[in-house]
Image: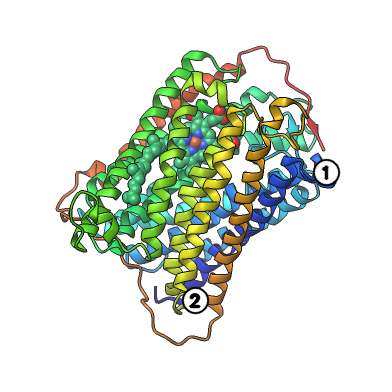
Amino acid sequence: MNDASERKLILSHFWVAFIAFVVACFMGEYQVLERSGFIAAWDSPSVYFASVSTHGVLMAFVLTTFFIMGFGYAIAASSLKQPLWNKPLAWLGFWMALIGVVLAAIPLLSGKASVLYTFYPPIVAHAAFYIGATLLVVGSWFWCVIMLVMFKQWKQANPGETMPLAMFATAMNALLWLWTSAGVAVEVLFQLIPLSLGWIDTIDPGLARTLFAWTLHPIVYFWLIPAYIAFYVFVPKQAGGYLFSDEMARLAFIVLAVFALPIGFHHLYMDPEQAKGWKFLHAIGTFVVALPTLVTGFTVIASLEIAGRLRGGKGMLGWVVCLPWTNTMVLAVILSLLMLIFGGFGGIVNASYAMNAMVHNTAWVPGHFHLIFAGTTVIMYLAIAYYVWPILVRKPLFSQPLAIVQLWTWFLGMTILTTPWHVLGLLGQPRRISTVVYNNLLTLAWKPYEFMMIFGGLILLGSAVLFIYILAKTQLSASAETVSVTIEFAEPLHAVESLPLWLNDFKLWNKVIAVLMAISFGYPILQFFFMDTSGSSPWGY
Ligand code: HAS
Ligand code: CU
């Protein structure tokens, strides 16, 4: 990473991502307080929904998209060992996305886009919200183009060679994101923008929810893939060992990307607009997509075991003790995997139709996704930041011990926040509503859990502020100490000698995705055009 202009590009993306992150953490703490109803003076559905909509957009769309773009540029430049292709285009994408965020923030903060991050119609926001979101997505498409062009150029320049794993996964994620964002893009362009501008009078919520479901599942894997990239290409090296299997890693990324797409109806199990046969088809795919995560768990734990044994670990579990627990990347992966156990278990419960009926639209669901996204996934974003910051700013990390404290507090805060949400969901507490004080015997049982969630949120807020503090202090320090200037990638235990084309390229997989999407979404979308529907009037600010 010798090119200063590339480092500036990457840092700019990361700063937008992490500022969005810390602002959203403040909102999160306000929201748990408001929801609990403990401070009567704070009760305000309008402020609550403005806040929770902004929080969701900042975390799910701004933190993720900007982080993924910045990380992608870092991976492309360092793993392919070549300059970034078309930096002006990358900056254009950055500015377009940033202007989109600012445009969307105005109605969000003024209560004119309190439609939550899933913006399900017939609730409708000010048009600026949808136009801003569109600019963010179009900006990210420039990033996709750059990643795919660099992937192709490298293949042409190195015929028959194995694409570095990190770049293989990054380009796969770019392809996944193009497919993923198509659903919501059609919804926003043809339904929500015309509705919010008054060009059409009614909207079909069933069609809109189907198009959003196209996006809603694969988007979570778009967020997750950078964490898995760190699992595979950074962790084994940082732990002092080798990647257990490069080929298995590629296979996991392929299955993740292919099966993330045709399964979105597990978000619509309780919806009437799709028939049970289609839901069943998507349910099968949902269980298939859990497999690459199990493979990932296996490969990463095997890689950690190799490292632990090389460091002198003996017996069945002695290697766990011998791992470098004070290395931020290693600590983060251990905490991430621990959160994945229950976060993933919750996902399997959600995916099982009968159990989904018990937890759908309850506090269980935010419990699931905070644990697996804000926990498992984001803790790896934090660890990646600690790893690349010294390389990007050419100064040593401000404080390793503080970074360790920060990671532990993030883990503790997230478990203390999400455990009560799972219980509250089972006790019938709805999601997507403001203050939940019904003053009856059932809601009395909620009280202790609400105390817990407020406490968890407070720890998380402190942890987020500490994170930003460490990054800022690192960047602003006057240190002249020399630090490593390159990103280092893990070596596989057995060198990859030759790979079949289907593990080294994704032309085939692109076609498989097209066929699976036509099967799983073709009829469910087309039916709206030959069904007699009356549409719904908008309901908004
Ligand atoms: Fe999910 C809802 C199903 C994974 C995010 N999910 C959501 C929503 C979000 C989200 C944001 O089927 C809410 C959307 C909304 O607002 O309405 N999800 C799943 C399933 C998985 C899953 C089956 N979700 C994720 C990931 C996310 C995410 C990843 C973000 C990054 N999810 C659902 C369903 C719903 C849903 C339904 C709809 C709910 C409803 O009704 O609304 C799977 O991919 C999970 C697979 C994971 C596992 C875990 C394996 C465990 C391992 C750890 C091993 C570690 C060990 C420890 C042993 C099966 C591999 C080692 C220790 C050492 C010390 C070394
Ligand atoms: Cu999903």
Q: Amino acid at mark 1?
A: Ala
Query: Few, some or many C-alpha atoms within 10 Å of disc 2 (few <14, some 14-19, many ≥20)?
Result: many
Horizontally, residue 110 falls left or right of residue 14, namely right
Q: Which mark is residue 40?
A: 1
Residue under the image location 49 percent in, 64 percent down = 405
SS for dot 1:
helix
Q: Earlier in the sequence, mark 2 or mark 1?
A: 1
Q: Which mark is residue 20?
A: none
Q: Which residue is mark 2?
A: 398
Q: Amino acid at mark 2?
A: Phe
One can see residue 355 in this view: yes
Q: Quadrant of residue 534?
A: top right
User: How far apart in space, not on screen, are marks 2 and 1 (Cα)?
Assistant: 41 Å
The mark tally for this picture is 2
Q: Which is more toward the observer, 427 or 239?
A: 427
Location of the C terminus (image quadrant):
top right
Q: Which is more toward the observer, 151 or 67?
A: 67
